[in-house]
Amino acid sequence: MKLLGKVHNYIMESISSGKKLHFTLIDPDKVSEPDKLEKIAYLMAEYGTDAFLIGGSLGVTPEEAGETAKILKKTGLPVIIFPGNINCLTPEADAILFMILMNSMEKYYLIEAQIAASPLIKKYRLETLPTAYIVVYGDTAVAHVGRIYPIPINKPEIILAYALASEMLGLKYIYLEAGSGSQKPVPPAFPKIVKENTNLIVIVGGGIRSPYIAYEMLKNGADIIVTGTIVEEDPQKAAKIIGAIKSFNE
Ligand code: 1GP
């Protein structure tokens, strides 16, 4: 079993040397044309993204996930499954965010999906990155599909309670999610309170469309910024966001 392995070490090495990271999210249901995908992958690698996430809430087949992983791996960067469901699993990836959707009201997303997935993950020899996944707002695809209970935005202490519980359960990562395509990112007070009170690796994503917002999140404790929509819509802007993350490193 590869619980925490090469990909985790790669992330930890950067973070413990004070660097902040950028992950590019690719939804195989949205970018399915191989040539276009390859072009985006090399472009993002050139701009300095640190890893690729593969995922989507709806419509991803195992074949699409596999083909996407093969193309992304050509860049030499880690390819990590960010599963919307067990249909996103593929042995072609390096690792998987092995997630609990902490604020779901459905036991499927709290434990059943993980049980269904674990034998496949073992068979595929995927490294697992144990992650608490919290979807903050109620009006996105991931919120609907995951049957989430939204987090009040003026109550960072509630996020902290989730984060503390996640750490006490032994999880290593926390992903504070606004939802792909969200009109607004998560409140910066959320990564801040988690960073100040836990040792979790803080991933922030959803609705990050400007270098300023990315920088704000980093200043407030985010270790890793994820962007998806902007990469598909405006790669040049994504380059600027990555530039802001890299300049934070300096
Ligand atoms: C979604 O956090 C990611 O899971 C990325 O969101 O598509 O809004 O960048 P965007």
Image: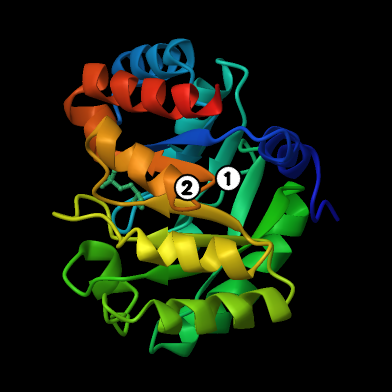
Query: How far separated are the C-alphas under marks 2 and 1?
Result: 6 Å
Kindly identify which numbered label has been placed on residue 76: none
204 left or right of 79?
Answer: left
Q: Please, what secondary structure does the residue beneath circle 2 have?
A: helix
Q: Where is residue 194 in the image (x, y as percent from the top left)?
A: 53, 67
Q: In the figure, 106 relative to 43: above or below?
A: below
Name the amino acid type tagged 2.
Pro
Query: Residue 68 is drawn in which quadrant?
Result: top left
Query: Residue 172 is drawn in which quadrant?
Result: bottom right
Query: Residue 34 is drawn in which quadrant?
Result: top left
Q: Can residue 132 be seen in this view?
A: no
**Cβ–Cβ under 8 Å for marks 2 and 1:** yes
Q: Name the residue under label 2.
A: 62
Please identify the residue farthest to the right as the structure is shown.
Answer: 1
Kindly identify which numbered label has been placed on residue 90: 1
Q: In the figure, 157 relative to 15: above or below?
A: below
Q: Please, what secondary structure does the residue beneath circle 1 have?
A: loop
Between residue 219 and residue 207, name the one nearer to us: 219
186 left or right of 225?
Answer: left
Q: In the figure, 21 relative to 33: above or below?
A: below
First reached walking from the N terminus: tag 2 or tag 1: 2
Q: Where is residue 243 in the image (x, y as percent from the top left)?
A: 39, 20
Between residue 198 and residue 10, name the one nearer to us: 198
Q: In the figure, 135 relative to 155: above or below?
A: above
Q: Residue at x 68, y 74 (%)?
A: 167
Q: Which residue is drawn at 24% across and 71% down?
A: 137
